[in-house]
Image: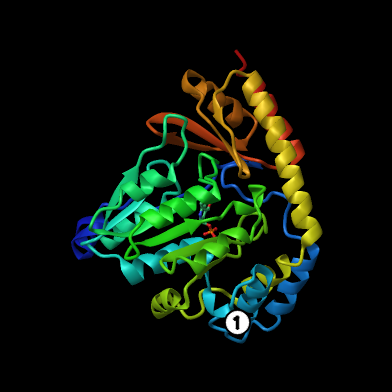
Amino acid sequence: MQDMKEFFAELMRPPVRKIEPYDAAPLPGAKILLSANENNAGVPEGVLSAMTAALKRGNRYPDSRNSGLREKLASRFGLEPGQIITSNGLDGMFTMLARAFMDERDDVVCGECTFGVYASNAEIAGAKTVKVPLSPSFRQEPMRFAESVTPATKMLFFCNPNNPTGCLAAEDEIREMLEAVPRRVIVVLDEAYTEFSGTDGKRSFGLLRDFPNLIICRTFSKIFALAGLRVGWAAAHPDLLDCLFRVREPYCVTSVAEAGAAAALDETEFLKSVYETTVNEREKLCRVIGECGIPFLPSRANFILMLPGEKTDALKEAFREKAIAARYLKCAGRPAIRISIGLPEENAEAAKAMRLCCR
Ligand SMILES: Cc1ncc(COP(=O)(O)O)c(C=O)c1O
């Protein structure tokens, strides 16, 4: 086929020319998937039957504002439905935030080692990213984020617990940051992993009373085990959400996904068991990693970040041999490997691979 690269490159908006396409497919042939921080326990039966029932009404458009799900979330978290918006995964939320608010004149503050979609959306919009370094102990320090705000800053992203480092900032540190940030800056608090952090899942919403520039983001992709269904949601001041509703694709959450998400909220036993297993397994894996002499960061999420230094290649090879998909990245200039906490038998295989690399 004729090469049309240059032809289409000319047509593209200039900021898009610099963007690499996103591709997070795990290794071909991988049998144990520990690369995407999913919930490997699978979709609970009750959620499957709710989605099957919704499939039968697939000839109808969904409720464009997902009112049923928003009402359920509101009553679960002590919010008003008008304070809630749903999206096609949180990725879809970040796209809406960029579409509604960012352009070439703006700065966007985010971590130097954090979820990459914040920066890529800013870059697509033509905005400039200001990256906040991690502390020497690899923590994201909220006040450093506030100090990085410039007169041009439009938005600030803080991921808590942070992906990929797993560290959690305390609520009073977040409040202190919000107090220091001017109200003209939208602060996005991404709590995709909050359910694994052992904190009260409702408390951060209390901040919305004092900070109308705050938007708190949650997802059904992690503990709720619905990554493939693509449902994210956020809570914020209704007038902030009005800006997002203007750019939101009308049916971006399907009726099947909405039914699955609403049912997943009722899976109390499943959620409790996933949380407890994750915490136990996280401790066990940390112990093994420590015994193997591999530096790692303590985690409050469903993954662990290792900084294996000269052991990186050996560890990569050990995972490859066991057909384990992990995530290979750079964090603060150092090679890093992030593994998700999987099922106990999957983690046991990961532990065996790590023991092969013991000192
Ligand atoms: C911190 C963080 N935020 C958001 C997302 C995106 O979640 P979703 O599947 O809802 O698009 C992820 C996915 O891994 C994530 O790690």
Q: Is residue 52 above or below residue 4?
A: below
**Image point 79% across, 50% down: which residue?**
273
**Quarter in which the C terminus is drawn:** top right
**Image point 74% across, 50% down: which residue?**
274
- Residue 72, quarter of picture: bottom right
Name the outermost residue toward the top: 359
Q: Is residue 266 above or below residue 22?
A: below
Q: Mark 1: which secondary structure?
A: helix
Residue 40 seen in the figure: yes
Left or right: 338, with 111 as reference point: right
Q: Nearer the viewer, residue 79 or 6?
A: 79
- Residue 306, quarter of picture: top right
Location of residue 101 in the rendering, given as x and y in whole percent from the top left corner: 32, 68
Q: Nearer the viewer, residue 345 or 246?
A: 246
Q: Amino acid at mark 1?
A: Ser
Decide: few, some or many residues near mark 1? Use Cα within 10 Å; few <14, some 14-19, many ≥20. some
Location of residue 24 in the rendering, given as x and y in whole percent from the top left corner: 49, 48
Q: Looking at the image, what colour scheme do you see?
A: rainbow
Q: Is residue 80 above or below residue 159?
A: below
Left or right: 148, with 285 as reference point: left
Report which residue position mark 1 lands on: 67
Left or right: 31, with 92 as reference point: right
Location of residue 202 in the rendering, given as x and y in whole percent from the top left corner: 63, 61
